[in-house]
Amino acid sequence: MDITRQGFAVTKKQVLIGRRHFLLGMGSFVGTDALAIASRYGHGKNPIQVTAQKSRDFSVAENTPLRNRAAAKGLIYGAATQTSILRSDTKFATRFAQECAMLVPENELKWKMLRPSLNSFDFTRSDWLANFASKNNMFFRGHTLVWHKSLPEWFKARVNSQNAEQIMLKHITTVVKHYAGKIHSWDVVNEAVFPEHGRADYLRNTPWLKFLGPNYIDFAFRVAAQADPKALLVYNDYGLEHSTPNDEAKRTAVLKLLERLKSKGTPVQALGIQAHLEGEAPFNTKKLRAFLKDVADMGLKIMITELDVADNMLPKNVLVRDRLIAGIYEDFLSVVLDEKAVIAVLTWGLSDRYTWLRDRKSRKDSASVRPLPLNAHMERKLAWYAIARAFDKAPKRGF
Ligand code: GLA
C-alpha cells in the first residue's frame, strides 16, 4: 500500500508516521478483518459489538486543514479552548489557528469565570479569546448564558425567586451586548431538559426553574434576541446521539421543548447537539437522521457543538483504539452532515493534551485518553482524517 498516494500525509515526517501506523496496525489485527468488542449497552447474552475494521480506509486526498475542508462545503469547523492554554502553549495556538475557523470559550463565558460578584462582570479572559479569534480570522461563539452548572459561589446566597428575573435579565443583556456584532451564535440555554427528573414537561430541576418556572427558557431567548438581533440563538443539550433508552427519551423531550418554544414565538433559531459520544455506545442511523430532520423541519439550524469520543471503555491498544474512534467520528458525521440544516461542527478541544475527558472519563488501565483530532504532540490522528473525510463527502450548502 502506498501511503502517500492514499493521502495519509504530505510532509516526509508525516508519511513515515503514516506508514508506521499502518504497518503496526496490520500486525495487531493478524488473521482477522474485524475486532469485536462487547459493549456494556448490550443486555444479557446479546452484547452489542463494536467493530474495528483493519481494512477501513481513512485516507484523504490533500493536506488541507479542517477549517478549509469545511468551508469548501459551506460549513464551519471549530473547537473549544481556554485562554490559559492558548497563552502558554504556542504550538497548540498555532495548530488551533490553522485548523479552526471558530473558537468557543470552554469556560470563560460561564458565570463562574465572568461574574466575580453579583454586581460585577470580568471580561478579561473572554475578551482575550475574542481577540485571538478575530486576529486569526475565526468566528467567535458564546457558551453559555443560562446553565445550572458553573455558577459562582455567591449565587446560592444572593439569587432567589424575587430577584432571579432581574439578575438573569441583567446578565444576558450585559454579556450579549458586550459581544454584539462580534459573535456568531450564543448557547442561550444549556441542558434544560432531563426526563429523569420526572416532570411532565421533561424539564430539569434547576435553580432557574425553581425561581422563575418553565418560562425562564422563553424569557432568556427573548432577552438575548433584544440585546443582539444578529447572533444566532441556540438551545444546547447532550445525550441526543446514541440509540440508548436515555437518549431516545432525551430526543423526544428536546423535540417537545423546541415545539413548545416555536409555538410561543420564542426566538430560538438553532439546536446545539453537544455530541459527547461514547466509544462503546450504539447508534441507530435511521433514528438519528429522523431526529435531525424533525429539528430541521421546524425551521431550525443545527450545530454540533461539543464533539469528542470518550474512549475509556475501548481497548488499550492505541492502534485499535484510534481506529475505533475514527470510525465513530466518520460514521456519526456522515449521517449528521447529510442534513443540510447542520451548519457547523465544533470539537470540545482540539488536542488530546487538553481534554476534560482526561479527568472525567479516565481509563482504568491509566493509559492516556485519545478523544480528539490531534494527539498530545499536536499531530493529526486517524480521528482528524475521519473528520476530514466526512467534510469532503458532505453535500455542499448554499452560500
Ligand atoms: C457540558 C457543557 C460544557 C462542558 C462540558 C464538559 O457539555 O456544556 O460547557 O462543561 O459539559 O466539560
Image (cartoon, rainbow, N blue to C red):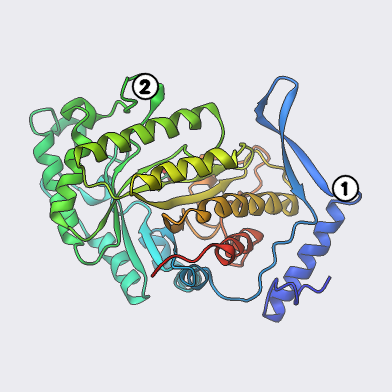
Q: How far apart are marks 1 and 2 (CA)?
A: 45 Å
Percent x, y of residue 126: 28, 60
Percent x, y of residue 333: 55, 53
Q: Is mark 1 on a helix, strand or loop?
A: loop
Q: Which residue is drawn at 54% across and 62% down?
A: 394
Residue 359 in view, yes or no:
no
Percent x, y of residue 367: 66, 47
Q: What element carries label 2?
A: helix
Quadrant in the picture for the C terminus: bottom left
Q: Which mark is residue 42?
A: none
Quadrant in the picture for the N terminus: bottom right
Can you identify the residue that label 1 sits on? 32
Q: Residue at x 37, y 35 (%)?
A: 254
- Residue 137 occupies which quadrant of the picture? bottom left
- Residue 162 occupies which quadrant of the picture? top left
Left or right of 99 in this view: 62: right
Residue 378 in view, yes or no:
yes
Badge 2 amino acid: His
Percent x, y of residue 30: 89, 51
Badge 1 amino acid: Thr
Q: Residue at x 46, y 72 (%)?
A: 90
Q: Residue 197 carries which label?
A: 2
Hey, which residue is sitting farthest front in the picture? 297
35 shown above or below 26: above
109 shown above or below 214: below
Q: Do the residues labelled 1 and 2 touch (CB within 8 Å)?
A: no
For marks 1 and 2, the one nearer the N-term is 1
Hey, which residue is sitting farthest right in the picture? 31
How many numbered marks are there? 2
